[in-house]
Image (cartoon, grey):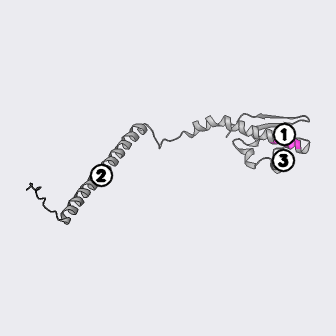
């Protein structure tokens, strides 16, 4: 007679399923908490990064309007002068003469009324039409106000 292998105790099917369910539950719990910790670390890192990058930034800084206007004024005047000169040339091409007043440019639809007043009014420009061209010069600002 040959020796027989030791008897293996039979497992109940419910015990195996219950043990597997515990392993899956523990694994799920570990993964869930690992992801939660990872998200918290990322938010903490983002907060530190934001603080270091934006600590010297003042989002509510007041702007010195007078200084800003002084910086922009030359460019705005140059743009207005360019608009006037182009409108005068187009008017002369269409009518074979230069207008006597800026308002004729508005009436012809070449300029908007606001183009005459922003940033300086029409009285701020010395305009003189000639037979072969025109003279357009900036007057010094009137400080009598």
Q: Which mark is residue 50?
A: none
Q: Earlier in the sequence, mark 2 or mark 3?
A: 2
| Image quadrant where residue 87 sits | top right
Query: In the rendering, at what x and y percent does residue 131 appear?
Result: 92, 36
Q: Is residue 29 above or below residue 116?
A: below
Query: In the rendering, at what x and y percent does residue 44 appear?
Result: 34, 44
Residue 144 as seen in the image, left or right of residue 130: left
Q: Dot 3: few (<14), some (14–19), or many (≥20) neighbours within 10 Å? A: some
Where is mark 2, residue-wise? 31
Q: Which mark is residue 89?
A: 1
Q: Nearer the viewer, residue 116 or 10?
A: 10
Where is mark 3, residue-wise? 104
Numbered disc 3: secondary structure: helix
| Image quadrant where residue 67 sits | top right
Q: Is residue 104 above or below residue 67?
A: below
Q: For marks 1 and 2, give the CA distance.
A: 75 Å
Q: Is residue 29 above or below residue 127?
A: below
Residue 92 as seen in the image, left or right of residue 17: right
Numbered disc 2: secondary structure: helix
Residue drawn at 16 percent across, 62 percent down: 11
Q: For marks 2 and 3, give the CA distance.
A: 78 Å
Q: For marks 1 and 3, give the CA distance.
A: 13 Å
Q: Earlier in the sequence, mark 1 or mark 2?
A: 2
Q: Which residues are magenta?
A: 87-93
């Amino acid at each position: 007679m040959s020796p027989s292998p030791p008897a293996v105790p039979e497992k109940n099917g419910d015990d195996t399923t219950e043990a597997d369910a515990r392993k899956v539950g523990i694994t799920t719990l570990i993964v869930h908490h690992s992801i939660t910790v990872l998200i918290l670390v990322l938010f903490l890192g983002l907060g530190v990064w934001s603080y270091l990058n934006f600590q010297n930034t003042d989002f509510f800084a007041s702007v010195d309007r007078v200084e800003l206007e002084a910086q922009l004024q030359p460019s705005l005047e140059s743009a207005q002068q360019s608009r006037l000169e182009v409108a005068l040339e187009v008017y002369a091409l269409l009518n074979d003469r230069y207008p006597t007043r800026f308002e004729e440019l508005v009436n012809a639809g070449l300029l908007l009324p606001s183009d005459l007043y922003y940033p300086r009014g029409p009285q701020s420009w010395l305009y003189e039409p000639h037979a072969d061209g025109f003279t357009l010069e900036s007057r010094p600002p009137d400080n009598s106000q």
